Structures are given as structure tokens and as C-alpha cells.
Amino acid sequence: MIDPDEQVRTAVEDLFAEFARTGSAYGVVKAFADTDRLFPQRAYGGAWAGRLKWGKLGHYRVLQALKNPAYAGAYTYGRSYDKRRVQPDGTVRSARRKRARDEWTVLIHDHHEGYISWQQFLDNEAKLAANHTARGARPPREGSALCQGIIYCGACGARMGTRYGNRHYVFYVCTSASDQASTTGCRSVAVATVDDVVGRLLLEAVTPEQITAALAVADEVTERHVRSHRAAELAVERARYEADRAERAFSQVEPENRLVARSLESRWEAKLAALAEAETALETARAAKPPLPPRSTLEALAADLPRLWDDPDTSPRDRKRLLRTLIADITLLPIEQRGQVRIGVRWHTGATDEITVNRKGPGRTPTTAVEIISRYGAAKTSAQLAEQLNAAGLTTGKGRPFDTAAVARIRDTYGIPAPRTAAVQDGEVSVTQAAKLLGVSTKAIYYWIRHDLVPVRRVETSRRWCIPWNEETQAIYRQQAAKPTSRGKRTTPTIAGGAV
């Protein structure tokens, strides 16, 4: 099974090596595309049988190689069968169906030399299955959310998805919300609230003996650079051979045979152009990657895993892979205390940890500020509370000083009542009272107020609306109530205590 062509062998070996590094078929395609490496394909049957062609590596071709046991040195027969079905019109249609491994007709291990071992073939199958999102798999992604794919809601048991509000605010949300099946205990939480705790827990759990994995990664990077350069060198060698062969053919033609000479000369020029292009690609490959630092430097760097973890060059996907090697899943557990979140961590060893932390995120009011507003909210106005919070050196979740509007929003969010003040004076009515007198809804009156259609007075301390109920004001409100609605109907108000 090993191809006698060294360039073909190198390309196939690179395919399996890149899959071991990236863990996905699309990662292999991207790695080949980034380094401008081509992949071979032989034609079978027909006039082009046995001819070797080179082209860009596609996703289907990667899957074809990863799923073929022949590359693992195994001989197989009967991995699929044709299923025929008779249609109502009498025609017969057939479709190819795959069999499970235990149903294969023949399976002979170590039948010939392969590019990978049988165990590596099984590991590759497991990786492909773990990447199959249509079947429920949640592989590591490129996003910044560290626990993406392994965090669950402790209230309903559903998986928690990742939502990106903007560049600075990412949060986990229970997927039951999209199915209208969420419970009262389902919550969303800022990614920073969970990821900071889980990342710190991981760094505390890693022992110095496990740090040698960083050196293995460095060796893998070095090997990858060598493979990339070697592939370019083999391409130059093949292009030089093709150019020399074209030159020999041109030199051996008889000068009188001008038609053949012109054809061979054109072919020679094309081969020389291909050689120049291959040499340029080799120089680009050598200059694209900077040389790695000495191993002693890597050892000193690997001794400090927290610095590696926080390094900007460490990709989010690499952090997720490291996290999943030790942690099985994360659960957002229910909690009664507002402003806090309870995080359950289950390790692959079966051990569990439970941590309670304060929530984070833009607009998140400090717990101390909420406690002060809850304690004095019924006795002090929003303006008085804003002065008290600013005097205590507290700020809003966005780092701004408190004002009346900010305190009012906190009251609405946490259901903190405002002090009962004598807002309505003699000769005035509230919006609710005016709605009853006019026989309309409060929404209609608020609509008139928002569009400045009626006179009204705003009480700044309690932020309530008071309506002067004199003859002139009543006439304006009755005129608005008598106007046709959006459906063309006319309201027929009845005023308590007399006719309109």
C-alpha cells in the first residue's frame, strides 16, 4: 500500500500528521491550503489509468483517506452493499449502504505496510465521530468561550449554548429558552463569570509532571515545519526532473522536424516555468515560519503554565482542548441568592468541585449597591439613594456614578418599592383615576402623554404623572377620548358622576 513515489508518500504522511495535530478534516484542508501544498490522485480505468495528477486537497478526499482501513495496513472486503428497491412503476433503484465493522465479510490486520497503525485508525474514527455536530457532538471551536460545548443547565439539564452580544460581552444561555421549554430556574450567565473560575481551577490542578506536554507540542511544531519544507523540496526535485527530461527530448529531435521541435520546445519552457514556481514556493516556505527558540528556552517557558495559558498567541481552541483533557463537563447549578452563580465541575477522574462566585458582566450592579437600595428603598427617594451610593464610592456596572434614573432601573429590575409620597395634590388625579373617569385604558392616556397631546405634571421625586383635573383640562382629555381609534371606531366614554 505504501506508494513507491517519495513525493506521494510524503503528501499522504502529511495528511495523517496534520489530522493528528488539528483534530479535524477541515483543519487538514486549511493546513495544506496555508502552505500551498498539493495532494496526489491516481486515475483508475480508462485512457488515463495509472496517471498521477496533483491538485488542491479537498474535504472529501481527507475523509476518504481517514476512513479507508487500507491506509492502516488492513485488507477488507464487504464494507458496503447495494440495497435495491422496486418502485411503484416497476423500476429498480439501488443505493450503496455501509455495513458495521463486525459485519464486514473480510478483515485482515497487518496485511501490508500502512501509513498508520490500526489503533491510530480507530483513534481517527473516534475523532471524526466527536466532530459530528449533527449527531450531538460538541468539538472545540474557535470562539473565546472556554466551556463551550461542555456546560449544562442545572435546572432543566439542557445544554447551554454560547451567545455573542458584542465584542466584549459573551454569555452562556440555556438552549431550552429557544424551544420555549425553559424553567424558572434556567439562567444565562456571562462567560467571564464561569471561564475565569474554571480556568483558575484547572491551573491549580495541573501538576509539574504534566508540564512535559508542552515540550511534546514544541517537538510537533518542529516536525511540522520539517514536513512542510520537505514537501516543497520534493516538489522542486520532481519539477527539475521533468525539466531535464523535457530538455533531453528536445535535444534529441532532428532539426528538420520543426513541428515536433516546436512542440517539445514549448513543453520544455512549461517545465522550466513549473520549476521556477516550485523553487519560489520552497523559498516562501522556508521564510514563512520563523525558527523556533532553543529547547532550553522552551523548557523554561513550559515551567510556567499560567503564563502559557494567558499568552495571547495561545488559541482559544488549544485552551479548550487542554481543559477537556481533565474536565468532563460544567454545570450551572440553581441558586437563590441574586447576583451569584453556583458552578459544578466534574473531572474525568469522577471527582467533583462546587464553587459559588459573584456574577460578572457589563451593567452588572455591585451586590453592595443592591443591598443598600433594598434596605433603604422604601424610605428614601431614588435621588437620595443615588447621593448615598456615590458618597460610599460605589459605581454602576459600567463604572459610572449613580443618578436617579440608574437607581430607578435597579428598583424595576429587583422589584424594590419606592417610598409612598403625596404626589397627587388637590385638584389633580392620577393616570389610573383619569382612565376610570374617561372610560379608557391607561395605555391610551400614556400614549397621549408621550406624544404631548394633553397637559400633565411630572413629580421628579417619585417619577409619577399627575393630571390637573379642571374644566379646561377635562375638555382636552375628553376630546382625545372621543377621537376615532386606529380601527376607525369611536370611544364612548362614560364619566362617573355625570355625563361627558
Image (spheres, rainbow, N blue to C red):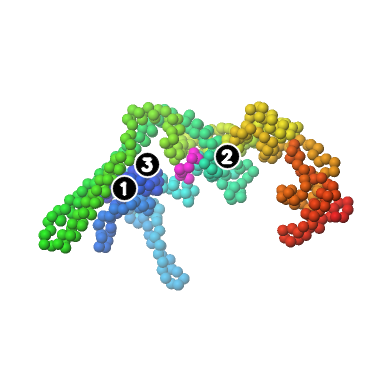
Q: Where in the figure is residue 335, as x and y percent of width and height?
A: 62, 36
Q: Looking at the image, do the residues carrying marks 2 and 3 touch, with CB atoms under 8 Å apart?
A: no
Of labels 3 and 1, the one closer to you:
1
**Magenta stretch, residue numbers:** 138-146
Residue for point 57% across, 43% down: 173
Cα gap from disc 2 to disc 3, whole angstroms: 33 Å
Which of 301 and 122 lies nearest the eye of the viewer?
A: 301
Neighbour tally class for label 3: few under 14, some 14-19, many 20 plus, Cα within 10 Å: some
Q: Split into 4 quadrants, where in the image is the C terminus?
A: bottom right
Q: Is residue 140 magenta?
A: yes
Q: Amino acid at mark 3?
A: Arg
Q: Which comes before the other along the chain, label 1 or label 2? A: 1
Q: Where in the figure is residue 456, as x and y percent of width and height?
A: 77, 45
Which of 114 and 267 lies nearest the eye of the viewer?
A: 267
Q: Looking at the image, do the residues carrying marks 3 and 1 touch, with CB atoms under 8 Å apart?
A: no
Which residue does the numbered mark 1 point to in the structure image? 37
Which residue does the numbered mark 2 point to in the structure image? 189
